[in-house]
Image (tube, coloured by chain):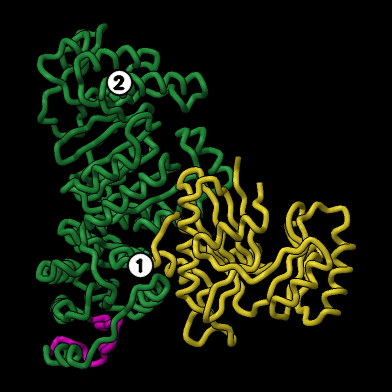
Chain colours: A yellow, B green
C-alpha cells in the first residue's frame, strides 16, 4: 500500500529528510491560493492513486511562473487525468540542482537495503547505482557516493558547472538507512528525484510503500 | 574402489597421515571396516565421543543421531544425502534430524556434505580422498564436490589449508558459524568461501566483520548469480538466493573481497594467507619492459598506487654499483634484461628499506642469462628482512623457471604466471578490492 503524500512527507521529515516546499490541493482554487504562499517557478503535478510515471503520461508541468501559466496547466492536467484515481494536485517550488535518486528496499537475505544513483528519467537506463545494507554510517554513505558516476557532481569543480554538497547527500543516505532499519513496515522507498545543491538535498518526489 | 573409499576414507585414507585421536568404527552388521574392528553402536564406545561422522543411508540417520544424543556426543557430521535437496519429504526428514541435534545440544554439520578437514591435526572427517598440506587458508564451501576437487588441486598447487569445511544443507551449523569460528582461529590467516546463498545476511556480515577486525582477509565467490545458474542453486543446496548486486554490496560493506572465479578465490586466498596486509603504495621491479607496463596498467585499474621513486632512493641504487646504466630510474623499476641475482637483491633491499614503499611486485621474465633460482633466493632473503611488507612475484615461464618458482612457494612467496593476478592479490592486500 502506497502512503498518501502527506503521510509520506511526515515520515521522511521525522527522519530528518528534507522535502520540497509544496502544497497538496484538492482543486483549481486551492492551487491558485497556494501559489501565493510559495515561491515561483512552480511544478504542478497530479499525485496519488494510479499515478506512477508522471513524465510518460504528461501528468506534470514545469517552469510555471505566473497565474496564467498555472491556469493553462490546470486545464490540461484535469483533462489528462480524467478517469484516473488520484489524490489531487501537488504544487511545488521548482528546484535547480543535481538530480539524484535515493531508494530503500528489502532483500530476503540481508534485510533493509539503501540505493543511491543519478536520478531522473534515465536512472533505469544507466543503472549507475550503489547499494548498502542498512543501517550504515556516514563513512559508508560517502563510499556509496564515490562508487557512482554521480560522484563527479561532488568534486570541487563539479561537472559542467553543476555542483552539490557531498555532506548533505551523505547525511540524507544515513537518515534513509535509519528509516529503513527502524521502520519494518516500510517495504519500499523511492525518492526520485532528490535535488542536491551546495546547501541542501531536497526530496522532490517520494513514493513510500508499506505492507500490511 | 568405491566400496572402500566413499565410506572408508572418513576415518582412514591411504593418502593421509594417521589422525592422533582415537577412532571407533561403528556398524551393527560388519565386524570390521578397512581393518578396523567395529562396535555395533556408538553407545558401545569406551569413553566420551567428541565427533560422530555419519554416512549411513538417509532413512537410518535419525536413529543413529538419537544414539549419538544418548551417548552425549558433542558434534555430528552427517555426510549422507537424501534430505532437503530432494524435495518436501527430504526437507521434513532434515527438520527431524536438526531437531534431534538441537534438543540434545549436539552441533550438526550437514547433511549432504563432504565433511571437515583440519590438516594440521591430520583430521579428515570427510570422504575427501586426500589431505592437503597444512597452511593458513581456510575454505568453506556450499558444494562438497567442489571441496573435494579443491583438495586435489591444492596438492598440485601446494596451497596450504588451515581447514576445509563442506557445509552441505546447513541444517545446523552454517556459513556464518564457521566464519565466526575461523575469525578467532590462530591457524587461519585468510578465509575463502564458495557460497550459493546466505541464510542470515546480518549474522554472516557480523562474522566477516569479526574476521576482518582480527586481520584476516575474507574472499567470497558467489555461485548462482544470474540466469539458469540462479535457478540451479535452489535445487543444489536448497539455499535462498537473494539479489546478487545486494550480496556483492553487502560483502564489500563488511570488508570481504568478492571474486569472480575459483582460480581467483584460491590464488588471492593463498597470497593473503602468506603475505601481510599493508598500506597502499607499492613498487614493481622487473627485468622486462612489457611485463612492467602490464603491471602498471593493472595497478591503475585496481587502485594499487605505484609510488614515485625519490631521488635519494635512486642515489642509493646508483651508489650500490649494481644497476645497469640504462635502468629505468622510475616505478616500475626496470632492471634491464641482463639482471642477475645481485642486481635483483640490490633493488629489493633498497626499495623495501624505504618507508614509503609498502610492498613489492617482483617480475622476472625469462632471458638468456636469467638465474631463476638465484633471483628467487634474493627475493626470499629480502622478504625475510622486511616481514611487514607484502612481496608478490611474477616469475613467468615453465620448466626453466620451475626451480625458482618452487623455491618461492616453499618459502611463502606467492608466485603468479600473469601480472593481472599478482596485481589483484596486491589490491586485496592493500585493501582496494
Of A55 and B301, which appears nearest the observer? A55
Q: Position of residue B387 (x, y in %)?
A: 13, 66
Image quadrant assignment for residue B108: top left
Q: Position of residue B360 (x, y in %)?
A: 24, 73
- Locate residue B262 relative to residue B345 in the image: left or right: right
**Mark linked to residue B103:** 2
**In the rendered structure, does residue B328 fall within the stretch colored magenta?**
yes
Q: Look at the picture and state if B47 lies above or below B120.
A: above
Task: Indicate the secondary structure of the residue bearing disc 2.
Answer: helix
Name the subunit of mark 1: B
Can residue B18 be seen from the camera position used here?
yes
Image quadrant assignment for residue B252: bottom left
Q: At 51% from the left edge and 32% from the top edge, which residue is drawn?
A: B235
| Magenta residue span | B321-338
Residue bearing mark 1: B432
Q: At 14% from the left edge and 34% from the top edge, which residue is drawn?
A: B17
Instruction: Confirm whether circles 1 and 2 share one chain.
Output: yes
Q: At 50% from the left edge and 46% from the top edge, which residue is drawn?
A: A184
Q: Position of residue B43 (x, y in %)?
A: 19, 11
**In the rendered structure, does residue B329 fall within the stretch colored magenta?**
yes
Of B225 and B336, which appears nearest the observer? B225
Amino acid at each position: 500500500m502506497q502512503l498518501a503524500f502527506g503521510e509520506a512527507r511526515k515520515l521522511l521529515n521525522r527522519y530528518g529528510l528534507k522535502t520540497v516546499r509544496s502544497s497538496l490541493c484538492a482543486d483549481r482554487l486551492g492551487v491558485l491560493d497556494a501559489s501565493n504562499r510559495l515561491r515561483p517557478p512552480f511544478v504542478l503535478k497530479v499525485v496519488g492513486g494510479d499515478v506512477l510515471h508522471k513524465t510518460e503520461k504528461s501528468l506534470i508541468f514545469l517552469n510555471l511562473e505566473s497565474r496564467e501559466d498555472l491556469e493553462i496547466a490546470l486545464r490540461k492536467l484535469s483533462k489528462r487525468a480524467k478517469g484516473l484515481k488520484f489524490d489531487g494536485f501537488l504544487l511545488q517550488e521548482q528546484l535547480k540542482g543535481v538530480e539524484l535518486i535515493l531508494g530503500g528496499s528489502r532483500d530476503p537475505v540481508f534485510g533493509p537495503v539503501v540505493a543511491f544513483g543519478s536520478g531522473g528519467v534515465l536512472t533505469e537506463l544507466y543503472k549507475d547505482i550503489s547499494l548498502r545494507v542498512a543501517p550504515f554510517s556516514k563513512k559508508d554513505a560517502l563510499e556509496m557516493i564515490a562508487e557512482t558516476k554521480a560522484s563527479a557532481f561532488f568534486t570541487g569543480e563539479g561537472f559542467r558547472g553543476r555542483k552539490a554538497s557531498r555532506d548533505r547527500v551523505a547525511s540524507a543516505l544515513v537518515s534513509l538507512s535509519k528509516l529503513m532499519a527502524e521502520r519494518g513496515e516500510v517495504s519500499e522507498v523511492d525518492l526520485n528525484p532528490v535535488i542536491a545543491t551546495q546547501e541542501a538535498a531536497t526530496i522532490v518526489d517520494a513514493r513510500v510503500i508499506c505492507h500490511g | 574402489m568405491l566400496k572402500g573409499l566413499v565410506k572408508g576414507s572418513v576415518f582412514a585414507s591411504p593418502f593421509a597421515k594417521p589422525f592422533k585421536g582415537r577412532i571407533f568404527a561403528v556398524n551393527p552388521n560388519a565386524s570390521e571396516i578397512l581393518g578396523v574392528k567395529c562396535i555395533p553402536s556408538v553407545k558401545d564406545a569406551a569413553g566420551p565421543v567428541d565427533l560422530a561422522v555419519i554416512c549411513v543411508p538417509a532413512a537410518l540417520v535419525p536413529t543413529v543421531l538419537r544414539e549419538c544424543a544418548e551417548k552425549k556426543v558433542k558434534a555430528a557430521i552427517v555426510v549422507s544425502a537424501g534430505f532437503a535437496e530432494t524435495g518436501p519429504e527430504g526437507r521434513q526428514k532434515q527438520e527431524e534430524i536438526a531437531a534431534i541435534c538441537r534438543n540434545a545440544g549436539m552441533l550438526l554439520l550437514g547433511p549432504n556434505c563432504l565433511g571437515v578437514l583440519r590438516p594440521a591435526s591430520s583430521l579428515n572427517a570427510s570422504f575427501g580422498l586426500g589431505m592437503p598440506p597444512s597452511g593458513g587458508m581456510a575454505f568453506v564451501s556450499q558444494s562438497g564436490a567442489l571441496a573435494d576437487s579443491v583438495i586435489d588441486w591444492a596438492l598440485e598447487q601446494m596451497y596450504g589449508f588451515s581447514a576445509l569445511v563442506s557445509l552441505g544443507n546447513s541444517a545446523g551449523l552454517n556459513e556464518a558459524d564457521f566464519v565466526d569460528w575461523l575469525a578467532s582461529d590462530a591457524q587461519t590467516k585468510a578465509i575463502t568461501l564458495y557460497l550459493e546463498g546466505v541464510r542470515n545476511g546480518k549474522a554472516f556480515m557480523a562474522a566477516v566483520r569479526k574476521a576482518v577486525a582480527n586481520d584476516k582477509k575474507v574472499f567470497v565467490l558467489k555461485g548462482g548469480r544470474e540466469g539458469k545458474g540462479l535457478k540451479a542453486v535452489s535445487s543444489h543446496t536448497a539455499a535462498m538466493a537473494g539479489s546478487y548486486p545486494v550480496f556483492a554490496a553487502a560483502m564489500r560493506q563488511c570488508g570481504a573481497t568478492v571474486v569472480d572465479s575459483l582460480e581467483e578465490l584460491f590464488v588471492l586466498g593463498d597470497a593473503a594467507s602468506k603475505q601481510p596486509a599493508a598500506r597502499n603504495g607499492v613498487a614493481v621491479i622487473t627485468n622486462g619492459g612489457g611485463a612492467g607496463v602490464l603491471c602498471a596498467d593493472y595497478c591503475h585499474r585496481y587502485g594499487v598506487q605505484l609510488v614515485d621513486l625519490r631521488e635519494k632512493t635512486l642515489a642509493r641504487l646508483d651508489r650500490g654499483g649494481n644497476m645497469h646504466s640504462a635502468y629505468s630510474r622510475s616505478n616500475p623499476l626496470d632492471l634491464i634484461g641482463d639482471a642477475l641475482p645481485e642486481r635483483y637483491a640490490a633493488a629489493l633491499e633498497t626499495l623495501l628499506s624505504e618507508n614509503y614503499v609498502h610492498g613489492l611486485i617482483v617480475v622476472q621474465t625469462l632471458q638468456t642469462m636469467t638465474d631463476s633460482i638465484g633471483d628467487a633466493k634474493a627475493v626470499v632473503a629480502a622478504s625475510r628482512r622486511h616481514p611487514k611488507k607484502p612481496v608478490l612475484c611474477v616469475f613467468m615461464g615453465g620448466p626453466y623457471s620451475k626451480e625458482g618458482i618452487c623455491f618461492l612457494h616453499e618459502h611463502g612467496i606467492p608466485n603468479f604466471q600473469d601480472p593481472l593476478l599478482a596485481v589483484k592479490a596486491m589490491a586485496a592486500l592493500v585493501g582496494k578490492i
